[in-house]
Image (cartoon, rainbow, N blue to C red):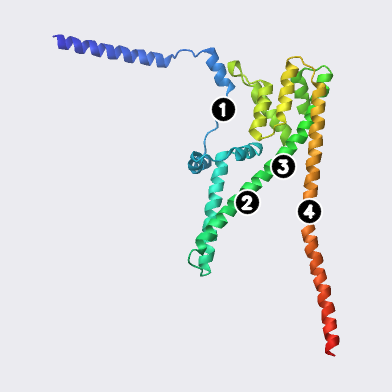
């Protein structure tokens, strides 16, 4: 009798628990308002496609090795490229170069260790060339960012001197500018403005984080000026001085690049002159030799 009662009690408890679970599922408790606002402030997660899954699978072993390096991450950030996609492309380039440089000597009938060494050297050159192109594109983007930043500092300083608030001056200055650099700064500020509650990112912090991410330390000056202006400090003259410094630095960089290109052109000119001199000497020596023979 006691066993039957125990079984009935267990069955009743399980049935009651099941009914309570169904009821709670049909009418779940309301989430806290802070959780809802925090969830709304986060960007929507895009669905992962097949190409993205392949990139992540190829990049996962390289990521465990600490790749890409911090400098490469900054180059990828300024170029708006995904690290996983970059690592996957580098891996494909390395495999293609290794196979190509290794098979060509074998097709020509060359054996031994030559195909292996050519494959290793070709792989290293291909990966190095790809990295050099990425760095050159990133440096060009950084120079463009600095040029835009110098103009932005002038416009923000003028807006602050005219009595506008720091957010209004920065927003009006960004709407006056165009180009990838201005769009990148505007995008980061819009993303920071969309955060709410305890996770809200101040404007100065967003600019400083962007500068650290893309390797443009000059953004720190704008971030500091924005924070000081928000506290009521007069920073219009400071922004003007920073803008002049950036323009002077950009001018010096362009002059160095022009001198470097001039130095690179000296070698082809020298080789051209040497070839022309050899041509003249060969003609003169031919004429002298023909005269002595006669």
Q: Are marks 4 and 1 in contact (CB under 8 Å)?
A: no
The circle on residue 44 is 1
Check disc 4 and report the residue beneath it: 263
Q: Is residue 68 left or right of residue 271?
A: left
Residue to which mark 2 is pinned: 129
9 over 73 or under it: above or below: above
Q: Vertically, is 20 above or below 85?
A: above
Tag nearer the camera, 4 or 3:
4
The N terminus lies in quadrant: top left
Cα distance, mark 1 to mark 2?
A: 36 Å
Cα separation between marks 4 and 3: 21 Å
Dot 2 alpha-carbon crowd within 10 angstroms: few under 14, some 14 to 19, many 20 or more = few
Q: What residue do we see at 78% from left, 24% from top?
A: 172
Q: Secondary structure at mark 1?
A: loop
Q: Nearer the viewer, residue 177 or 158?
A: 158
Q: Which mark is residue 140?
A: 3
The spot of residue 25 in percent (x, y) is 41, 17
- Assess whether mark 3 and mark 1 are in contact (beta carbons under 8 angstroms): no
Residue with the most extreme bottom position: 294
- Give the camera-side residue of 269 and 37: 269
The answer to whether the residues at label 1 and label 2 have Cβ atoms under 8 Å apart is no
> Along the polypeptide, which appears first: circle 2 or circle 3?
2
Sequence-wise, which precedes: disc 4 or disc 1? 1
Q: CA distance from mark 4 to mark 2?
A: 22 Å
Q: Is residue 182 left or right of residue 162?
A: left
């Amino acid at each position: 009798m006691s066993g039957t009662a125990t079984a009935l009690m267990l069955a009743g408890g399980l049935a009651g628990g099941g009914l309570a679970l169904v009821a709670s599922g049909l009418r779940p408790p309301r989430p806290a308002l802070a959780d809802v606002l925090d969830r709304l402030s986060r960007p929507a997660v895009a669905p992962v496609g097949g190409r993205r899954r392949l990139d992540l699978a190829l990049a996962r072993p390289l990521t465990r090795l600490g790749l890409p390096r911090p400098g490469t991450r900054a180059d990828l950030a300024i170029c708006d490229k995904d690290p996983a996609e970059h690592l996957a492309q580098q891996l494909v380039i390395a495999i293609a170069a290794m196979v190509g440089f290794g098979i060509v000597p074998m097709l020509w009938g060359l054996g031994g260790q030559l195909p292996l060494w050519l494959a290793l050297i070709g792989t290293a050159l291909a990966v190095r060339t790809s990295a050099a192109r990425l760095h050159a594109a990133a440096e060009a983007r950084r120079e463009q960012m600095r040029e835009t930043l110098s103009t932005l500092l002038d416009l923000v300083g003028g807006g602050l001197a005219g009595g506008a608030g720091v957010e209004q001056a920065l927003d009006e200055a960004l709407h006056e500018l165009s180009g990838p650099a201005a769009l990148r700064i505007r995008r980061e500020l819009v993303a920071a403005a969309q955060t709410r509650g305890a996770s809200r990112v101040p404007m100065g912090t967003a600019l400083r984080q962007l500068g650290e991410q893309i390797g443009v330390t000059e953004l720190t000056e704008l971030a500091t000026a924005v924070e000081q202006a928000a506290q009521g400090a007069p920073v219009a003259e400071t922004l003007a001085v920073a803008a002049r410094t950036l323009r002077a630095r950009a001018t010096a960089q362009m002059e160095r690049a022009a001198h470097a290109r001039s130095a690179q052109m000296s070698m082809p000119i020298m080789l051209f002159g040497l070839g022309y001199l050899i041509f003249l000497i060969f003609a003169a020596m031919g004429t002298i030799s023909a005269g002595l023979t006669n």
